[in-house]
């Protein structure tokens, strides 16, 4: 038997782990918001139809509010990944690359600090809200609000990576 056949090829294992990780990111940032948006959209259309042609329903409002929360938070993660969120960059665009780097570092440090401070209290509150259920559908509030904790964790990872990239660029002198 060859040496390659007797040992586990770590390159393939690392590549597989990377593919699983990237697929997991896609699930959380693309596919869950996409499905939840479809639920939101069709529930909203049903709510309008029932309100004007049949009898008004109470549960669609509750479901659309929870779906909107999920879509906004998890969709925001994808916007951060693709760097396609709305940004007001008039001052940022007017300065040179070195000033832009320091502005990014300052902004990302503030966000990272704020999200770190908010993480544990937010998680604690979401878990605390597990006893409460929504009025009509009886959806547990910890389930409804948990995307906020996911949002904080993923944003900490992305902002941390941006900080590291900018710090490495600063110390290498890549300006």
Image (tube, rainbow, N blue to C red):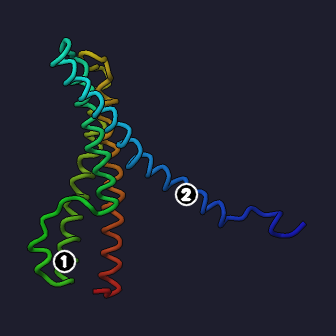
Which quadrant is home to the N terminus?
Answer: bottom right
Residue topped by disc 2: 19
Residue topped by disc 1: 100
Q: With respect to residue 34, does 80 lie above or below?
A: below
The x and y percentages for residue 18 are 54, 59
The x and y percentages for residue 92 are 13, 74
Q: Residue at coordinates 80% horizontally, 68% vertically from top-left? A: 4
Residue 73 lies in quadrant: top left
**Dot placed on the residue nearer the N-terminal end, 2 or 1:** 2
Q: Contact (CB < 8 A) between labels 2 and 1?
A: no
Q: What number of labels is visible?
A: 2
Report, in whole angstroms, how far the alpha carbon at label 2 lies from the one at label 1.
33 Å
Which quadrant is home to the C terminus?
Answer: bottom left
Q: Nearer the viewer, residue 148 or 70?
A: 70
The x and y percentages for residue 131 are 30, 20
Q: Residue at coordinates 39% horizontally, 41% vertically from top-left? A: 32
Mark 1 neighbour class, 10 Å CA radius: few under 14, some 14 to 19, many 20 or more: some
Residue 167 lies in quadrant: bottom left
Q: Residue at coordinates 30% horizontally, 30% vertically from top-left? A: 42
Q: Residue at coordinates 55% horizontally, 53% vertically from top-left? A: 20
Mark drawn on residue 64: none
Q: Nearer the viewer, residue 62 or 1?
A: 62
Task: Using the rendered image of the protein, determine whether residue 106 is visible from the camera's viewpoint.
Answer: yes
Task: Using the rendered image of the protein, determine whether residue 128 is visible from the camera's viewpoint.
Answer: no
In the orientation shown, which residue stands out farthest toward the right?
Answer: 1
Q: With respect to residue 154, does 83 lie above or below?
A: below
Q: Secondary structure at mark 1?
A: helix
Q: Nearer the viewer, residue 105 or 37?
A: 37
Q: Nearer the viewer, residue 134 or 119?
A: 134
The x and y percentages for residue 91 are 9, 74
């Amino acid at each position: 038997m060859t040496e390659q056949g007797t040992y586990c090829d770590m390159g393939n294992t690392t590549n597989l782990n990377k593919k699983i990780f990237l697929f997991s990111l896609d699930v959380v940032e693309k596919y869950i918001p996409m499905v939840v948006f479809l639920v939101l959209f069709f529930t909203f259309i049903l709510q309008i139809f029932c309100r004007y042609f049949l009898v008004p329903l109470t549960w669609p409002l509750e479901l659309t509010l929870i779906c909107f929360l999920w879509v906004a938070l998890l969709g925001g993660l994808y916007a951060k990944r693709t760097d396609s969120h709305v940004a007001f960059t008039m001052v940022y665009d007017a300065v040179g690359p070195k000033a832009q780097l320091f502005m990014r570092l300052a902004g990302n440090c503030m966000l990272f600090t704020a999200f770190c401070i908010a993480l544990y209290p937010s998680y604690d509150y979401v878990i605390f809200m597990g006893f409460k259920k929504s009025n009509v559908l009886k959806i547990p509030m910890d389930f409804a609000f948990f995307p906020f904790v996911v949002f904080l964790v993923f944003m900490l990872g992305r902002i941390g990576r941006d900080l590291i990239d900018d710090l490495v660029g600063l110390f290498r002198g890549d300006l």
